[in-house]
Image (spheres, rainbow, N blue to C red):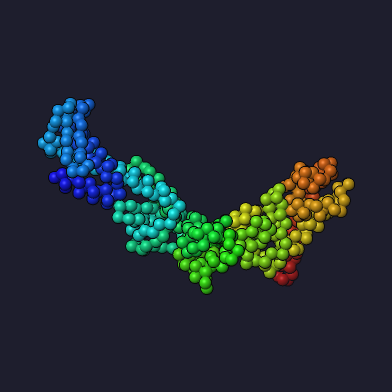
Amino acid sequence: MSQELLRIVENIARDKNIEKESIFVDLEEAMISAARKHFGEPESNIVVNIDRSNGHITASKDNEEIDIKRLGRIPAQTAKQVMIQKIRADERDSIYAEFVQRRGEIISGTVVRYESGTVIVNLDRWTEAFMPKGEQIMGQTHRVSERIRCLILDVKETSNQVKIILSRTHPDFIRRLFEVEVPEISEKIIEIRALAREASYRTKVAVISYDEKVDPVGACVGVRGSRIKNIVEELGGEKIDIVRWNESSQVLVANALMPAKVSEIALCFELGRATVVVDEDQLSLAIGKHGQNVRLAARLTGWDIDILTPEEYNLGVERLTSCVKTVEGADDTLVDKLIALGIISVGDLNDVGVEPLVNELKIDAEIAGKLVAEVPKEIERLEAESKKKEIEKQLSQQTKAVDNEA
């Protein structure tokens, strides 16, 4: 019996990943509960010890030895129930301790079922995890028994279970996939400096190499695109742009907007805004489908990116120049100073205000105040001009419609 007890403890410890000592303690506490129930003395001094080397059980009540095996069926049932509860609690603690340390890692599992859109994934014989609908890649469906890779997003401990939340949409899922597919990243030769993702559509990854002999973009793409192809296939065809990181914000913004070619970039540090000029034929590329390219580039670089055509840029500068000319004491070089600060429109001037003009450009405070005060008038004039053009356009369309009917 003693050897059998040791084998049972060994098996439970191995199967449920619980420390053997915890199981021995649980057994002792369960036997104490059973003995107290048998004697009907909840507060009695009962001690049970299990020899860890041979499995021999000794018990005493008020320092007098008792035979724990002769307590009867009901105490035995009590011991069994207590034991089950304690082992389940130990199992939850063990699962939580293991997976909370693995949060942020990629893990493989087997799809077992769907529950109201949530995918239930079996991580091992005993542990199930949950991938909510919002963490699943749109358009991808998973078959029962299919092996899938996911990111361990979160681990929560509730009263009766450990809830492991998985994700395939989180940006870190792609970060971990790159670490798996590109050895140079896991070896710290290449670093992912920034990452922006719209799951199932497109991701931009900015990379830098700490070894001048290693091209970060080429290493991530792989020979004939082999490495990036594996990641794209894992993501169900999601497009991935590999961007070369640069400490210069101008260069980084230009890289982030690829495949569009950028003509000019004006950075306004006061507003955190990058005004990017692209030729007309590059405009749709720069903006991307539903604004996706510019949106991801903004998140990747940390700049609010405003894309203009040369005509729009020049018009903004002309209106800014017109506004400056209305201010007494403002010379011709002021417009150039404003553009150097990243202010290329009347709206920008309004957003920046007086203080940066005085502190950064060393403009006389009185002139700066007059200039900013003039902005609302100029904006009002531009709005009136825009409304007038809109009315003229509508009248023109109505006239053409009447002529066509005639």
Work out whether residue 6 can be spotted: yes
Camera-nearest residue between 197 and 152: 152
Whether residue 243 appears in this view of the structure is: no
Q: Position of residue 10 (x, y in %)?
A: 23, 48
Percent across and percent down for residue 15 are: 27, 51
Q: Quadrant of residue 247?
A: bottom right
**Residue that extends furthest to the bottom in the rendered view of this protein:** 224
Classify 151 as above or below 35.
Answer: below
Extreme-front residue of the structure: 53
Establish if 67 lies above or below 237: above
Residue 24, image x and y in percent?
Answer: 24, 41
Q: Is residue 110 left or right of residue 401?
A: left
Q: How many marks?
A: 0
Q: Residue at x 49, y 63 (%)?
A: 183
Which residue is located at x 38 percent, y 56 percent?
119
Q: Quadrant of the C terminus?
A: bottom right
Q: Residue at x 33, y 46 (%)?
A: 94
Q: Is residue 322 left or right of residue 288?
A: right
Residue 305 location in percent, x, y? 66, 56
Q: Quadrant of the N terminus?
A: top left
Q: Using the rendered view, name the quadrant where residue 260 is placed.
A: bottom right
Q: Is residue 376 left or right of residue 325?
A: left
Residue at image position (74%, 51%) is 348
The one nearer the camera, 146 or 395, is 146
- Horizontal arrangement in the rendering, residue 173 relative to residue 121 (left or right): right
